[in-house]
Image (cartoon, rainbow, N blue to C red):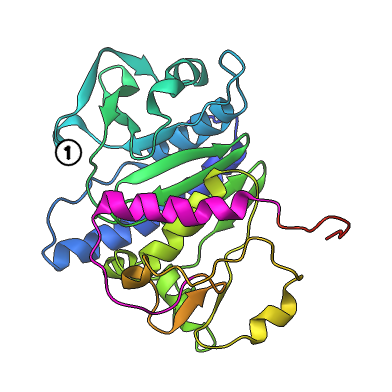
Amino acid sequence: MPDLAYAAARAVAPVVHAHLSHHLEQAVQRGEQNLASLPPVDTLAAMIDVAFWTSLRREEGYLPRISLAAVRPEETPHPLHFDQPLRLDATALTRVAPAVERPGVHLSVAESSDGLTVWGISRTIPKYTCVVEVAQPGLIVVKHHRGDELTKYANLAVLQGDRIRIVDEQASTQPDCPPLLSSLLGFDSPGAWVGSMGVLVQLAVSMRAHGRGGLLLVVPAGTGGWRDSIVHPMLYAVNPPFGELTSRSLPEQAFEGSLVAAQTIPMSREELVRTVDAVAGLTAVDGWPDGIEP
């Protein structure tokens, strides 16, 4: 493995490689198609290393937000090729970061005659493609694609400075693991992310995007005991309950008194995104009444 300045990259890469190798092998046995190739451990380590150092830089005062995908040009449809591939270093990635800030746009990394390079930009990547994302300065998330455009990626590891957290995919098999958490951690159940679980996660992601904090509370439908733990009055409570997301919500649960079971309403992806963002926007409002401190 190359001499990397970020020691955590060297520690995490073999774990990520073993995870991808295991799931790719199982996917091949199941006869699945459109699978990613398995990058070497050195490639994974180099991607994590450069992502970390890029996260600490600035370009004209802006924080770089990049997503690196280990994907070859022939593995993605309609790739955007750079005329001159970029070196896999923090300086080059910081300069090109504004081009790939939007979700689902990845700087694509592959081996070439000149070593590891960023050959271009990809928007559609195969299942189990390893993605390294810069979330915040010094905060790196390593994940893999689940193979469906509507599903959230599966997080494999989170690195913050010298702190490393590996996501335990076996946690959902423990007897005391709540059903909701089992669904959220289900590495081998991508279909669940298209329905109710997908809406919960997309709502949480949309809440995080506004950067003002917020809490997603999941409670049993038809009960009010949870209100005892909420400071009153709730200045921005929704009444009557908002039901547009019902077709994507959990059948017996609701979102903090705002969503309850109602009729099923088919939604396009664009409609779902707009509706999720509308609900998540309420969590950006400071709900503390005047004179009451949290």
Assign a secondary structure to mark 1: helix
Residue 153 appears in view: no
Q: Dot 1 surroundings within 10 Å: few (below 14), some, or many (20 or more)? A: some
Depth order, front residue of 256/56: 256
Which percent across, then down, holds residue 156?
46, 55
Q: Which residue is at 34% across, 69% downward?
A: 248
The magenta region covers: 259-286
Q: Is residue 151 left or right of residue 172?
A: left
The residue that label 1 is drawn on is 75
Vertically, is 156 above or below 53?
A: below
Q: Which residue is at 58% across, 26% downward?
A: 63
Q: Which residue is at 76% across, 70% downward?
A: 231
Q: Is residue 148 left or right of residue 143?
A: left
Depth order, front residue of 182/263: 263
Give the number of callouts.
1
Residue 241 appears in view: yes
Q: Residue furthest top?
A: 84
| Magenta stretch encompasses residue 271 | yes
Which percent across, then down, holds residue 77?
14, 35
Q: Which residue is at 15% across, 68% downward?
A: 30
Q: Residue furthest front?
A: 240
Q: Name the amino acid type tagged 1.
A: Glu
Depth order, front residue of 273/140: 273
Q: Quadrant of the C terminus?
A: bottom right
Which percent across, then down, holds residue 230?
72, 73
Vertically, is 152 above or below 44?
A: below
Which percent across, then down, holds residue 76?
18, 37
Vertically, is 53 above or below 266?
A: above
